[in-house]
Amino acid sequence: MTVRVRFAPSPTGYLHIGGARTALFNWMFARKHGGDFILRIEDTDQSRYVEGAIENLLESLKWLGLDWDEGPDVGGNYGPYTQSERTELYRKWADYLLENGHAYKDFTTKEELAEMRAYQKANGLPLGYDRRHRDLSADEIADLEAQGLGYTVRFKAPLDGQTVIPDLLRGDIVFENNQIQDNVLLKSDGFPTYHLANVVDDHFMQITHIMRGEEWISSAPLHKHLYDAFGWNMPNIAHLSVILSPSGRGKLSKRDQAFQDGDSYVLVKTLDYAKDGFLPEATINWLANIGWNYGDDVEIFDIADAIQRFTIPDMNPAPTKLPFSKLEWLNGQYIQALEPLELAKLVKPYLDAAGIEVNVDALIALMPAMSVRMKRLPDALEFLQFLDDESWQPEQGRLTHKKLAEPAAVRAFSAAREFIAANDYDLESLGGKMREIGEQYTDNQKAGPFLGTMRYAVTGQQVSPPLFESIMALGKTRTLARLDGVLARLDSA
């Protein structure tokens, strides 16, 4: 048997981070077993369709590095892979259920359904369809059709006994059949509901394993009954744990955008993680550890190694808090592991957007020192603002130190300027000379007071990269111009 799994989102909005985790686990399972990962778009609910949602889904999955073997954009042997293009197939199998006594036509109007629910609420009765058209005779059905009444197609659920769903993660889940509704399979507009389309597609696309969210457990008995009615084998199924907010106070809802939860600011849209400067490799590493664990107390791992360890029984079915702070730590670790050129290229678009002009060579000089200070790519902005000459406005009162009074500061800055102007220096020689100047001109003959003052002088920032790397990034001409500005300020004091 070739393992075939699918990720089947509805284009009703952005890709939620919980949906991204579902896609990841399906993808990992397929890759481990040399199987196929299928992307299917479930767009039968046209009233909830959101323009641009499909493009967002595709872009989100691509950013995470989750490639699919079959789908609406790449094709495959079992397409189409968009449900709105498969409606004739669903109608055919709805007719099969009607002809074989597993479904019936329900002519109840929206107004009658509303009255039914109001009556049930008022009298404390269980809510749901009362099966009023379940056992109509052929003549009664013909009469209602002759009146031109529209209808939905409902499944005839068993009224007694139990339904057992073997869940690969949770064991057998038992349902009492008298608690199961006669769900709508085909709407009055001819479009199928999720239940019918899902089962038909999974069968004809030869899906072998279904991994989906815990919220779909309640629909599992209906799907089992549909498979039985069609005479098909139900795929293996596993319902994944629900993801809670970092505080554990509630489910991470798709309706959420981004929100504050305790000390954590939580992102919900998958692509917002990209916009906020998280690396896809770090995000995948983090997601894989939510409801599953790599083991051996290993926090940082390559997803290829995780695939080899991944098994469904090792997943945790219990609700799982979203450890957002762990992602920030992980992202910082991945940033530190990047080569300076690679990190510089990733940081530059954020600088460009902020109007800070800098060439890649200048950035490369700063990246080794910067990477240990960053949790997200935009963190670079706070440190690298000094590269914008228009932003350089050092306060005169900060150009001296209690151990480096103004006359000594002038001599020290002048000596630093003279060295930088007259020499071709590298990081080591620059550092050695600046320390020497600091020891010569400070009252306590220690370099620290001068180096700190010098760093503020050339960057104009209290928080900035180390002095020597900042000078290398600025280059000789710009550093000399700033030292001239510092000396002019001190001279005018």
Image: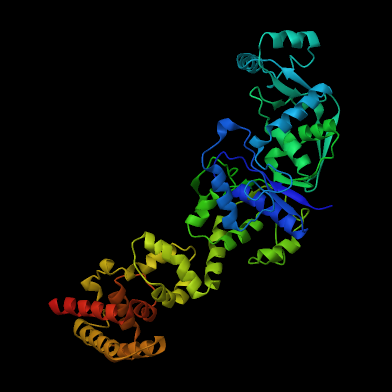
Q: Is residue 446 visible?
A: no
Q: Is residue 36 above or below residue 148?
A: below
Q: Is residue 223 above or below residue 312?
A: above
**In this rendering, does residue 392 appear at all?**
yes
* 258 displayed left or right of 314: left
Quadrant of the rendered image containing residue 239: top right
Farthest residue, direction left: 492
Residue 400: quarter of image: bottom left
Please tell me in which quadrant of the rendered image residue 458 appears.
bottom left
Residue 478 or residue 68, whichever sits in front: 68
Where in the figure is residue 435, as x and y percent of width and height?
Answer: 35, 88
316 or 180, which is in the foreground? Answer: 180
Q: Give the total of numbered labels.
A: 0
Query: In the rendered view, would you say 377 is above or below 249?
Result: below
> Where does residue 296 sit, x and y in percent of width and height?
72, 67
Identify the residue at image location x=78%, y=58%: 33
Task: Give the camera-side residue of 182 and 326.
Answer: 182
341 displayed left or right of 473: right
Where does the image place residue 148, in percent across and percent down from the top left?
A: 66, 11
The x, y position of residue 231, in whole percent, is 86, 34
Residue at 37% over, 80% down: 472
